[in-house]
Every structure is written in structure tokens, then in C-alpha cells.
Amino acid sequence: MLKIKNLHASIEGNEILKGIDLEVKAGEVHAIMGPNGSGKSTLSSVLAGRDEYEVTEGSVDFLSEDLLDMEAEDRARAGIFLAFQYPVEIPGVSNINFLKTAINEIREKKGEEPIAAKDFLQRVKEKSKLVGLEGKFNNRSVNEGFSGGEKKRNEIFQMAMLEPKLAILDETDSGLDIDALKVVSEGVNKLKSPDNATIVITHYQRLLDYIVPDYVHVLANGRIVKTGGKELALELEERGYDWIKEEAVKA
Amino acid sequence: MMLEATVKMSNKEKFLSHYGMIDFSHDKESFVEKRRAAEKALKGLEFPTSKTEYWKYTRINKLIRESYQLGPADVDSDIDLSVPTKNCLVFVNGYYTDELSWTEAEAGIDFMPLSEAKEKSDKLKGSFDSLTKKEEIFSMINTAYHQDGAYLHLKKGKAAESVYYIVNISAGNQPMSNPRNFIYLEEGSSAKVVMKHISANEGNSFTNQLSEIFVEKNANLEINKLQSENDDAYQISNDEVSQEGSSQFKMNTISLGGGLLRNNLNLDLNGEHIESWMNGLSLLHGKQHVDHHTLIHHREPNCVSHELYKTIADDASTGVFNGKVFVHPIAQKTNAYQSNANMVLTDDASIYSKPELEIYADDVKCSHGSTTGQMDEEAIFYLRSRGIGKKKARAVLLNAFLTDLVEQIGVEHLREEVQSVIDKKYSGVK
């Protein structure tokens, strides 16, 4: 589904990603871990299409298309979803209108008719249950005045509504207490299918107790320095990141 | 010698000489007296300059140097007034135009041209020109040289069913006009009014409008002023409002077109338990310059005033807001809220914002806030990351910025009209 080859990216002249190789297949969950400043958020930003990052080398194929050539909105329409580390507050735009606009823009680009009001409301009802919202946020402005936990639940609700092929969860666990973490993880797990894939970006192992990855990659200094199974996450939790960095230097 | 004499005329004299041809012989004596008093006052008044604090951000040189003429009282072209109401008075270049107007009388409501009311209304005779600022040059020009305007009078307890429309049209070559309105709501009455300013011409025009508005006890009045003239039109507008106890008044000023607009809105709260709203929505483009000056006097205790002005300035346009809240010593328990929020879409657009509070009572709640910013790029990226295109994302955010003001418009048809202008204007935004 996603093939990243030798990806280099900079912001304001500073190279952050220094040759990332990663392949994600349908049905898989990949965790990307790493210390602060290792390039985790840069990777998610580059994949989602933030303009301020410059890709200097390498390629990213998504469903056999050149992802780097696409605008952010086209990536979303093609099936990429980024759950933001810091979801943005948008005063004056109700959550429900926001989602309806997004769904209809995506449908329009595919040459489909706008979604019927009844079908839309049915979908809202069904999907909001996944994250324990039951339509609670519908008429509130997007993320405005939401608690940290509410914002993250709203991200997963949007993901459920948009049914992406590849979801990238950027530090979704940050700022969550354990109960919110469980709710969010359950939501993600319920959305998992053999046809979609998930990349979980996190600093801590605890999220991976709930969203169990097939692969764990360790990112350090702009490169993936180690890849393993879910047990690698536990090892990192116990030993920290320093030994990985040392190993990487030796290699 | 003649030539020399002409050269020596001041800007003011030259400007006022345009009005010399107006024939006021039909006016009743008491109104002629008011005109003469205003003409006399004008001798001691000068046009504001860049040194005049009240006009600091608005230069009127280009306005007063133009040469205008009294326009025809009719329009050539077919114009679509799109006014779905039973009562609409239309004025072309300041003159009442019977063929374009229509009315369907409601019991207890008088709605007629001011010229007709001068013959019939005692209230008009007694209160005409009582609210105008005698030191304000454009108010005095209007009093001295006004042509016609609308007169609306609601008798005690009367709730208007129809929306009352007052439409002013600029037509022909370089027209000038001095429309004068008089609105009087007796105790316990209520009405909604729309004042619409449009152009049926291209090029310059000058409209100097003045309204005197009396809202008696327990009365409720909403005025929506829609300014959508062409981008070479100049307009100066003075709205003088006097409110008595427990009355409610709302003014929504919607500025969409016009080259140079200056709106002075002055509210006098003369009783207790009054509630007032002053709202402004300005969507500026090109080289438009729109200046809103508001002044509210809280003269008695226990009143509430709300003020919300928003401007979106595109291209090389300029928005000015100066809002003054004056709380008199006796006016305890005053609640006054003022907010001015602006969005600039380009580097060439400018905003000048000056909120002023003068509070002489100690037990009051007053707040004011002013913000000016650009489009929130992070919010745009958020919307795009959900599949919403760049243009649509901007439109969504601009709409969201304006939505609370659009909701303030209590006339459904007008609200829809304004919404559709917003949709059209920003759907293709850069």
C-alpha cells in the first residue's frame, strides 16, 4: 500500500529525515517509535502533505501513485488520514458541517453525488458510538473548547467517518489519561480491517498495549535504525532509547 | 475678475455651490427655518482634514474635490430591486420616485415620503433636526439641502407585520443626494426596517444620508443597512438614535460596495433597562475604504449594549473602526460589550481599529476587544487534510468568521441575500 524509499526531507534548510525506507501492506499495523527530535512528526507531516517541508530525495508510493506529487487534500481523498498530535480549533464551523463538507468534497472529486442527509446522519450515529461520543460533539465548533481527550476522540471519530485506507496516528496518546487512551484505542481497533493499514507514531510504549503493532520501527536521527515485532516496544520501554542510538552509531 | 473670484472660493464654498440650484420653496416654513439655521451653521464649519481626530484615518479630499450634479429623479435602466415586501419606498438621487415604490398600508403605521410627512406629521414638525449634531458638517449639509427621504411612524403598541424597505439609488452622471429619513416608534411598537443603497450607474456619486430615529418606551426596532453601491460611490451616513426606557434597538450595517464609506452611528440611551445592538459586517475588496464610527451614551442605569463589528479586507482595501462607549456617572449597572475582529487577506489591505471606553460610573461591566489577523494557515491545513480543497477551506473559514453577524440579521430574505454574497465572494478566493 505504502512504499517509502530513501526519503530525505528538510525544513528551513535543516535536514530532518535522512533516508527512510518503509513498506506498509494492507491489514498491517506499524508503530514508529523514537526519542524527541528523531523525526517522527516530520515523517507524518511529509506524508500528510504539509507545504513547509521540502523533500530533497527519495520517493513515496501510495497505492501505486506518487504521493509526493499530490496536494494535501488529494492525499486525503486518495485515502490517507492523519490524526493530528494537536488538533486545530475552528470556531464557527460545527463538527457536523465540517464532516459533511469533507465527505462531499471527496465524493465530488470521485464524481459521486453528495451524501443523502439520512445516510449521513446514520453514519454519524453509528461512528460516533465507536469513540463513545453518541453525537455529543455534532453541533459544537470543531475542537473549540474541547479537552485534550475530547480532541483525540474527535480525531478518531473523523477517521471513522472518512474510512481511510491508511491512518497515521501522530502521538495520539499524548495528553490522554488511561480511560481516554482505552476509548481511543478501541475505536482504532474496531476500524481495523484487512483492507486498511495503520501507522502509529508514539514516544511511549503504553499505547501499544492497546493498539498491538505487527512491526515496530525505531527512528533515530532521521533514520529507521531498528525494526522488530511488538516485543521491541517493550524492550524500549525497559531500556530507553540510548542503547539503540549507540548500536546505530556502531553500525 | 470673475475667474479670480472663482479661484478664491474655498473647497467648501465650491462644494456647497453645487446645491444652490435646489428649489425648496415647497417646504413648510418651519423646515425652511431649519434649513436656514443649518446654512448659517455651515458658515462656521470646515471640512475635516487629516488633523481632525474624528476623521484621522479617512481622507475626504477626493470626495469633496469632485464635481457633482443634482441627479434625475428616475432611472433609465431596469433595475432589479429584489425586495419581497409589501412596503418599499424608492428614492432616486434623493428624490422620491412614485413609479418604483409600492406600499400596502397597515393600520397604525404611517410610511410615506418625508416631503408628504412635512405636511401631516406633528411629531416631525416638533422633532425634526433635534437629534442632529450641529457641529458635524455633513449633518448640517443634509439639514440644509436634503431633498426627500422616508418617514416611518408606528403608533402605540403597533407591531409591524411587513418589513419596511427604504431604497436609495444613485443614477446618472456624477449625482449627489442628501436623503433624510425620520423613524418614530411610539411606546410598545415594533418594526423591522431595511435601508438599501445601490447604484444604477457607473462612476462617482455622493450620497450624504442622515436618519433620525426615535425609539420610545418598550418599543423594538431593527434596522438593517445594506450598502452595495458601485466601487466609485462615496457615501457619508449619519444615524442618530434616541432610545427611551426598556426599549430595544438593533442596527446591522452591512457594507459590501462603495469606494469610500463613512458611517457615523450615534446612540443615546435615555432610560433604564434599554438594550442595544450595533453590528457591522464589511467585506472589502479593491481600493474600498470603509470607516465605521460608533458612539453610545449610557445616560441611565441598568442598560446593556452589545457591539460587534467584523471586516474582511482583501486586495488594497482599508477598514476603519472607532467605537466609543461613554458611561455617565449616574449610569450604574451598565453592561457594555464591544468587539471588533478583522481579517486581512493580503499584504496591501489595512485595518485601523480604535476602541474607546469612557467610564464615569464605578459599578459597571464593560469590555472591549480588537483583533486583526490573517487566515489561520494551520486551520486551512487541517481542513485540507480531511479532503477539503484549498479554496473551499478558505471559504469555510471566512464563512465561519462571519456567521455570528449573519445570524444577527432578523429579516430572512436579507439574511439569505447577504449569505449568497458571502458564498459568491469567497468561493473563488485566492
Image (cartoon, rainbow, N blue to C red):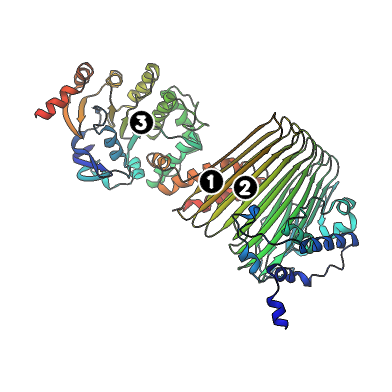
Q: Tag 3: Cα neighbours inside 10 Å, few (<14), some, or many (≥20)?
A: some
Q: Assign a secondary structure to mark 2.
A: strand
- Indicate the secondary structure of the residue bearing disc 1: strand
Q: Chain of mark 3?
A: A
The quadrant in which residue A214 appears is top left
Of mark 2 and mark 1, the one earlier in the sequence is 2
Regarding residue B80, the answer to whether it shows in the image is no
Q: Is residue B116 above or below residue A55?
A: below
Where on the picture, by quarter, is residue B222? top right
Q: Is residue A143 above or below residue B339?
A: above
Residue highlighted by disc 2? B322
Residues indicated by labels 2 and 1 sit on the same polypeptide chain? yes
Q: A110 and A13: which one is in front?
A: A13
Residue A202: image x %, image y %?
28, 26
Amino acid found under the numbered disc labelled 3: Gln
Residue count near mark 2 (Cα–Cα under 10 Å), binned few <14, some 14–19, many ≥20: some
CB under 8 Å between discs 2 and 3:
no
Residue tagged by mark 3? A85
Furthest residue in direction bottom, as rendered: B1
Of circles 3 and 1, the one toward us is 1
Give the spatial CA distance, label 2 vs label 1.
13 Å
Marks 2, 3: nearer the viewer: 2
Identify the amino acid type marked 2: Asn
| Label 2 vs label 1, nearer the camera | 2
Identified at 74% across, 57% down, the residue is: B139
Marker disc for residue B342: 1
Q: Is residue B187 visible?
A: yes
Q: Chain of mark 1?
A: B
Discs 2, 3: same chain: no
